[in-house]
Structures are given as C-alpha cells and as structure tokens.
Image (cartoon, coloured by chain):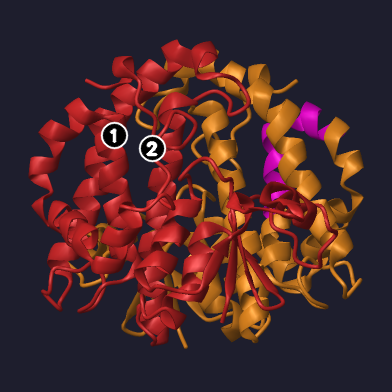
Chain colours: A red, B orange
Amino acid sequence: MHYELYYWPSIQGRGEYVRLALEAAEADYTDVARQHGRQGDGMSAMMELLDAGLPTPPFAPPFLKAGEQIIGQTANILLFLGPKLHLAPKDEAGRLWAHQLQLTVADFVTEIHDTHHPIASNLYYEDQKAEAAMRSEDFIRHRLPKFLGYFERVREQNPHKGGFMVGGQLSYVDLSIFQLIEGLRYAFPKAMARAEKKYPGLVEIRDRVAAHPPIARYLGSDRRIAFNQEGIFRHYLELDR
Amino acid sequence: MHYELYYWPSIQGRGEYVRLALEAAEADYTDVARQHGRQGDGMSAMMELLDAGLPTPPFAPPFLKAGEQIIGQTANILLFLGPKLHLAPKDEAGRLWAHQLQLTVADFVTEIHDTHHPIASNLYYEDQKAEAAMRSEDFIRHRLPKFLGYFERVREQNPHKGGFMVGGQLSYVDLSIFQLIEGLRYAFPKAMARAEKKYPGLVEIRDRVAAHPPIARYLGSDRRIAFNQEGIFRHYLELDR
C-alpha cells in the first residue's frame, strides 16, 4: 500500500508522529505538501482536498490517504497504521491500549503548544508573552512531571519488561515518547536537564528509537524538518527555567 | 456484559459522553463513584483502581471496566463501546470516521474548558479572570464558529442524508453533539443565542437526541447531574457576550 501524508510542509508539528511511524517501518509514502512538481506545489493539493466537499472531511491536517480512505486526527491515523506497519499489537485490547497512550500523548502535546499560546492560536506569541510565562511556569512545575511521571510508570508497569511502552516490541508509542523528549529538550533545555533524571526509562526509549536504523537514517536526512519557532515545541529563553 | 464506569461523581465533565452512550443504549452499567454502599463509597474504589499498579493504568478518569479490561480516554471508551451498543458503524472505515469526529469533539471540549482556565487547572478561576476573558473572546469569535461550522458541514456532507452525523442512524457522535449544544447554551447563553441560528442541523440533532426515549428518561432522572460551576461548561456572566 502506498500512503499519502498531508501535513504542513515547514514544521514537525502533529504530523511528525505519523512521519516517524512511516519512517520507522520504511513504508512507501509521499509527504504530499512537501512535494514541488510540475503539477504545482503539494500545498495546493492539500488545501484542495480540505475544501473538496468530501463525505468524510478532516477538520485539519494531518490526514492520511490510503487508497480511497481519508483518515484524520493524528492518533486515529496511528490507530489505523499501527498494525499494518507492525508498530502496534494486532489484538483489539492491545490496539486500544496503545491508542489510549497515544491520546494521552495528544493531550500533552496540546498543553505543550499552549505554553506559548495560552490565549489564542491566531495571535502572535508576542501578544501573549505575560500569559505564556504564567502558563509555562505551571507547566514546568505541575504538568510536565505529571505526564512524564505517568509515562515512566506505564513503562515500569508493562508486564513484558523489555523496556518498551506497550508489549514486548517497538510501537508507535515509543516513537512518540522519542519525539516528546526531543521536543521538550529543544523547548525547555534548562527545565528538562533537571527533570529528565527522574525519567530514565523514557530517556532509554528515546535513545533506543534514535538508534533504530530506519529512524537514524531519517533523522540524518533532509526529510526530518528541524525544530523551529513555528511548530508545537518552541524555544523561548524566558519561558524556560 | 455489565460495564463499570469510573468518573468524578459530581460533574458531567468528560464522563458524560460515555454516560450518554450507555444510557441511549440502555446498557447494564454502574456509575461506580456515585454509589454509596456498605463497602464504603464509590470514590475510594475509583481512587484505589487509579493507584493499583495495573499493567494498563489510566492517566485520569473517565475509565471503563468491561470484564477484566480497563479502558481509559473518553473517545477510546466510545471507540470500544460504539459497535457493542449499536451506536457506531461496525465496519473498520466507519468506526474510524466516527472516532475521528469524536476526537475533534475532544479537542473542542479542551478548548471550552480552557476558556475559564487558560493558565492553570490547579488555580481558581478567580486567579485567571483577566486571561479567561481574553481567551473567551477569541473562543466566541473564532473557535466556536470553526468547530460548530465544521460539524454542521459534516452533517450536510453525510451521503446518507438522514440528518445524523455518521451513516444513517444514531451514533455516539450525535449524542456528543447534543451534549456540546446543551453545554454551550449553559455556558454562553448570549453568544449561543446568536450563533446557533447558523447551525440548524446541529440543533436538529440536539432535539432528536433529547427526544430519544432512553435519553429523555435519563435527562428526567437523578442520574443526569445538572450543569454546575465545577464542570467543563461553566457559566460566568462576564465571559459571555
């Protein structure tokens, strides 16, 4: 199966969780909005599909085209792809458990985004700096340890004891943990330098994912977009403590 | 199958989307934390389960116990229950589509919550009133129409043309639309009085769900907790415009 991923071409954002899964499994895919071809650029293809009056219109990117099926919402895309890419358990209970963790990742990602945009996504950061400072302080003190502590505990309580988040092998949840640790290190280097000592299991997952050969190749390629100040994870000196 | 729902006993909150599904299907279930019995109250049962060192620990309520399986995250619970309660399509593509919509409902619910708590959930509303006013203004102007407009369009573009959100019969997505309209009317009565004229299809779904006999009985019972100032939807005069 050839997959088409539709997502903003200049940021990692929420699309990155899907890119990591496709790359880890060496799937056959096109990152449509990043293509520049004779037919015009890939961005117009994405915007056209969003406005096409489909029977199942996505609310926003990312969305995935698999044959005639169009699937939106990051965690839903991974729910669909997981078993096909051998990155999730195949049984129903295992699939739901991996998905439950991914939904908690999604909640965390929303809170990470809101550290720099607590008032409105359509305002600039500069227009909500004071509020962002307050929200980031609460985030570093309360929310970051709550989420990372939870994920560390999930890994510890995994009966398989192989060091993965779900079952006894690599899943898309491990890939998402990798992305969270990388992103938090970029956005909050000081806070993370202190905090991550408490989450050695998650750091081990981060290292193991980074060393997974297809991911190592991806990270070294120009398909991996660098972190930047347009994405979910942003580094503002004044928000890090 | 007997289901046990675990959720905070004094609010509708995120648990209400699951309660509505169980009630609409007249399922056999216990709302555990609302039980007061000889064994101590249901809240301790919920807190014990959260701290029990389970192999699949939930991050937070709501979670559902179905036999030995414990399932967390509201949308994930509905993904599991949907086909069993005849409240979702049974085929894979239909299940994913209903779930995708429910995940967009969940995103909307988070934004609704943040209108009164834009800085921190562990601070009082009174400690973030100015920021809540700014966030609510943006919410009413931009986010409310974006989400409701999307859901209205989904209903219009549903090829089944029966007036439901998904396919040709009642699904948990319709129940969630009912809850959104009810909650928004409670929280933002002035803004909704103006806005809802633009979403006649959603209001029709709201009315149809309210008239569904098991839901009508539920709404008239003391199992339906009233909206209040502890839940997701809160009415603050100064945030409504």
Classify 10 Å Cα crowding around label 2: few (below 14), some (14-19), many (20 and above).
Answer: some
Chain where mark 2 sits = A
**Label placed on residue A227:** 2
Nearest to the observer: residue A9 or residue B223 = A9
Q: Quadrant of residue B201?
A: bottom right
Give the x, y percent position of residue A132.
42, 19
Tell me which label, 1 or 2, sits earlier in the chain.
1
From the top left corner, tell me how far across and down residue A224 is, in percent. Answer: 40, 50
Is residue B104 something one can see in this rendering?
yes
Q: Up-down: is A109 above or below A155?
A: above
Q: From this viewpoint, which residue is outermost toward the front?
A: A38
Q: Describe residue A122's horizontal placement relative to residue A176 as left or right.
A: right
Do the numbered discs 1 and 2 sit on residues whose CB atoms are within 8 Å?
yes
Name the residue nearer the viewer: B110 or A15.
A15
Specify start and end residues of the magenta stretch as a single range: B179-193
Q: Amino acid at mark 2?
A: Phe
Question: Which residue: 39% across, 40% down?
Answer: A226
Query: How packed is label 1: few (under 14 Cα within 10 Å), some, or many (20 or more)?
Result: some
Instruction: Write the residue at 83% across / 78% down.
Output: B168
Q: Is residue A125 above or below residue B208?
A: above
Quadrant of the drawing holding the C terminus of chain B: top right
Residue carrying label 1: A186
User: Residue at left 20%, top 70%?
Assistant: B54
